[in-house]
Image (cartoon, helix red, strand yellow):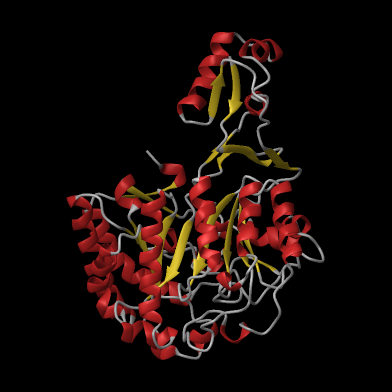
Amino acid sequence: MYPIISGSYAMRGTIQEPHLVNCREFSVTPLEDQALAAIIMDCDGQTSVRELASRYEISIDDLLAFLNKFESAGMIDFSPQQIRRRPFVALGQQSPWLREVHIDITNRCNLARWCRHCFRGDKLNRSQDVQTADWLRVIEDLSAMGSYSVAFSGGEPTLRRDLPQLVECVLKHKMFFGALFTNGFVWSKNMDAILSMLAESGSKTTLYVSLDGPTAKLHDANRGPGAYQKTVAFIKRLVAFRERCDAKYRLTVNSQVTAENMHTLLSWYDDLKKLDIDRWRITSGRVTGRLAENTGLLPSWDELFVEYEKLICQHIADYRSGPTMLLNMESFFNTSMLNNGYALTFSPVISICDYKEQACSIEPNGDVQFCTSWGSRNFGNVFSTGIRDIWHSDSLQTLKQMKVGQITECQNCDLLQFCGGGCRLVPGDVTKKDPTSCERYRRFVDIILPLLQAAGISFYNERSLP
């Protein structure tokens, strides 16, 4: 028998931290033992089990016991004869691993004059798009350094005529095309081409569509006249294409909760369930960009958490009744808590923004940032310096490796285990507390936490998991 890495998998990461990754859905398996990683890398369809056992001086039975675990997980295939298909291996030369990259591929937006809460504010429609060849080189550089997941946003990314070409490049290099963010205002041939590629590849890319309310009055106040009708039609078309072509992509509606729409959350939730989307992702946003100019949109925390409590109660009831739309409510709640029966909390040794420790974002002009929200600080430009040098720079890694225990002002606070110190962007000084996080998480502890605990959800830091 000839073992080979499955066609839907690749080996990515760094030489020091190799991983088997699924190119069709987000799945990462670390290969912590270098000897075992070497065996997996040699599963090339040309080398038999007997030859591998001899090469690594282990018994055939022990080798098969090891490989069978990967076969049962769909990561390794066995062929009765040699296969001329080289497994895809891309490992960076240096750790830490840049696992995920969010690329804002354009500054152009067709709704820039309308959106009152856009975090980009007056930056939109101020510059020409970067050339296709330049973005293709960035994607190739990311692949070469072992990066895994790529997301596209903007501006409005569907305005780029070359968007299918950029998506195709990600898929060709056997990276996971993690997400595409759109306002869903205009359906174009671009969308037809992209959806066809996703259907053919079987990629479980998440398509995020922005919706600012359950009615035309609420949504159009932010997106312009007629936007609600167009966006709902856009979502329905995505659902219909997926059903017709048996595509695997996921549909998420992205919504910002404001003072204007927060009292509609329950009816809005019911309406979205009827659209057959996979997930509703809601946030109250950060006071940046246009939202800093339209503070009247900011919800009252007391009123908002009353609405959040009602929505979580309804979702838990739906969950217990059978399969239902997933819900992601900021960092306070998501359906996976119910699936797992637990949620992870912060400890002093966990990195700030731990879910982005292995990620960064790239602006439309090529500037690299800590994340998409941190527009006030750049760490270099990919078109002049290159992503590899920027990612491994001391300035960026000092922040990426910063631990919760270094936020000195928060160390004696009972909220720290839940908020992790909040967003480091807000206080300016990264060692100071985020006062908006304090306000929100006090209400989380008082209102939401008892509700989740009553639903059987336990809270652990990663070192105390049972």
Number of numbered discs present?
Answer: 0
Residue 120 seen by the camera: yes
Q: Where is residue 136 in the image (x, y as percent from the top left)?
A: 72, 59
Query: What residue sits 60% from the left and 60% below the top?
Result: 164
Q: Nearer the viewer, residue 242 or 87?
A: 242
- Any part of residue 353 in sight: no
Q: In this view, does 370 lie above or below 466?
A: below
Q: Residue 48: where, in percent of width, then height?
A: 64, 14
Q: Which of 398 and 315 is in front in this view?
A: 315
Q: Quadrant of the N terminus?
A: top right
Q: Which residue is located at x 52 percent, y 70 percent?
A: 188
- The quarter holding residue 332 reads bottom left
- Name the residue nearer the viewer: 96 or 153: 153
Q: Residue furthest right?
A: 384
Q: In this view, does 383 lie to the left or right of 275?
A: right
Q: Is residue 43 left or right of residue 462?
A: right
Residue toward you, 129 or 20? 129
Q: Residue 88 location, x and y as percent?
A: 66, 37
Q: Residue at x 50, y 91 (%)?
A: 293
